[in-house]
């Protein structure tokens, strides 16, 4: 074959390789207690939808955002829940159905043989790994290659933190049902702590405060709306909102004006507990690493960090500076996107096979 023929053959192979990479189905998935985040390499776009499913017995009625619209409104014979619990898969079958329905919305021709990257919690047991594997290779999704990336590593990459930095970095993720603190140095998480407190507990604390102060029962969705509208951890302004709930005495619907003071009192109970746990965690870090963390600041992310001034409040409580990420709940899936798109970062993804579990 001539030199020109060789060049043409190589160009053809490169073109076919580029087409293969373009058409290859690769996804980055973060299964959260509140929402599912999916990055599609083919479409180069991220999607987010509520991790909820509504069912009556064995019959599925609604999934995702549609199911969330029914949350706390459905009749007693319809169950509306998240398949995740405190950052872990609580119901394998329902989680697979929820993910499958979301994937079909993203890609109508989604089939078998995809590469799926999961952001997963630290220190999982073999059974917990098997749960993630079966979500991608069960009754609905099949023959997919599964890769797992530790969630703190994915968060760090999304926020521009080098996990191989030997000086050490700390990442704090305040999610929907749990908060995780992790110290990363020399390419691994050397110390980590997870506590069962997050945005959902804040919503429930607000509902509890409203019930104590006004004898009014409100749902957690109303509590969440009050948190987003009036929740402020500093520079608190006098504010009030009308809400409708059930009177604790009469059992009849009643309208009440709820002040921001009551809302912030509920939020403060949870945030103070997070801050106290974080301060205890910081005391366990080796002094030389703690010094560098204090110098560069703690990286803060997660959906519940949308609460105004939460970084300033935690800084005043712990004495450490904070770098608040603007990615919020999408930080882990953004980290997966970087891993999928950059072959040099694929070393952070661990392939999982059923026979090795």
Image (cartoon, rainbow, N blue to C red):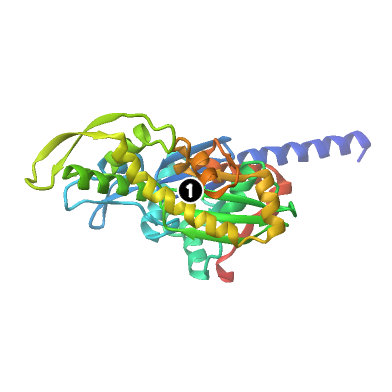
Q: Which part of the image, by quadrant, shows the N terminus? A: top right
Q: Quadrant of residue 224?
A: top left
Residue 93: where, in percent of width, then height?
37, 59
Q: Residue 246 is drawn in which quadrant?
A: top left
User: From this viewpoint, which residue is outermost toward the left?
Assistant: 250
- Image-based side of 347 in relation to 115, left or right: right
Look at the numbered disc 1 and give the secondary structure of its residue. Answer: strand
Q: Residue furthest right?
A: 3
Query: Callout 1: few (<14), some (14-19), or many (20+) C-alpha neighbours within 10 Å?
Result: many
- How many numbered circles are shown? 1
In-image side of 114 versus 89 (left or right): right
Q: Is residue 314 visible?
A: yes
Q: Residue at x 55, y 70 (%)?
A: 357
- The quadrant in which residue 196 appears is bottom left
Camera sees residue 115: no
Residue 296 located left or right of residue 329: right
Spot occupied by residue 179 in the image (x, y as percentages of width and height):
48, 53
Nearest to the observer: residue 8 or residue 226: 226
x 52%, y 40%: residue: 311
Instruction: Say which of 273 and 340 sits in front.
Output: 273
Residue 164 placement, left or right of 304 = right
- Where does label 1 land, which residue? 174
Q: What percent of the width, then of the height, locates residue 86?
A: 42, 57
Q: Nearer the viewer, residue 29 or 259?
A: 259
Could you tell me which residue is drawn at 11 percent across and 39 percent down?
A: 253
């Amino acid at each position: 074959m001539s030199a020109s023929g060789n060049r043409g053959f190589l160009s053809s192979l490169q073109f076919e390789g580029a087409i293969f990479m373009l058409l290859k189905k690769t996804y980055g998935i973060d299964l959260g207690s509140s929402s599912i985040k999916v990055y599609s390499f083919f479409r180069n776009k991220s999607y987010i939808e509520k991790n909820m499913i509504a069912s009556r017995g064995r019959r599925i009625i609604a999934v995702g955002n549609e199911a969330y619209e029914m949350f706390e409104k459905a009749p007693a014979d319809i169950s509306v829940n998240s398949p995740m619990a405190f950052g872990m898969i609580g119901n394998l079958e329902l989680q697979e159905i929820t993910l499958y329905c979301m994937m079909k919305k993203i890609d109508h021709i989604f089939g078998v043989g995809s590469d799926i990257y999961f952001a997963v919690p630290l220190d999982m047991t073999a059974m917990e790994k098997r749960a993630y594997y079966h979500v991608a290779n069960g009754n609905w999704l099949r023959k997919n290659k599964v890769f797992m990336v530790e969630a703190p590593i994915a968060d760090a990459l999304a926020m521009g933190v080098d996990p191989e930095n030997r000086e050490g970095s700390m990442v704090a993720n305040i999610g929907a049902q749990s908060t995780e603190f992790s110290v990363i140095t020399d390419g691994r998480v050397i110390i980590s702590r997870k506590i069962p407190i997050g945005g959902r507990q804040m919503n429930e604390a607000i509902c509890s405060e409203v019930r104590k102060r006004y004898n009014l029962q409100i749902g957690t969705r109303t509590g969440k709306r009050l948190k987003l509208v009036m929740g402020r951890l500093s520079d608190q302004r006098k504010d009030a909102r009308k809400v409708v709930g059930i009177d604790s005495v009469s059992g009849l619907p009643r309208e009440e004006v709820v002040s921001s003071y009551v809302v912030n009192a509920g939020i403060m109970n949870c945030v103070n507990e997070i801050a106290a746990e974080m301060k205890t965690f910081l005391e366990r870090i080796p002094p030389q690493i703690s010094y560098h963390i204090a110098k560069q600041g703690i990286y803060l992310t997660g959906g519940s960090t949308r609460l105004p001034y939460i970084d300033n409040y935690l800084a005043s409580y712990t004495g450490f500076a904070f770098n608040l990420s603007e990615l919020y709940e999408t930080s882990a899936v953004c980290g997966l996107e970087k891993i999928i798109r950059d072959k040099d970062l694929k070393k952070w993804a661990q392939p999982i096979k059923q026979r090795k579990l």
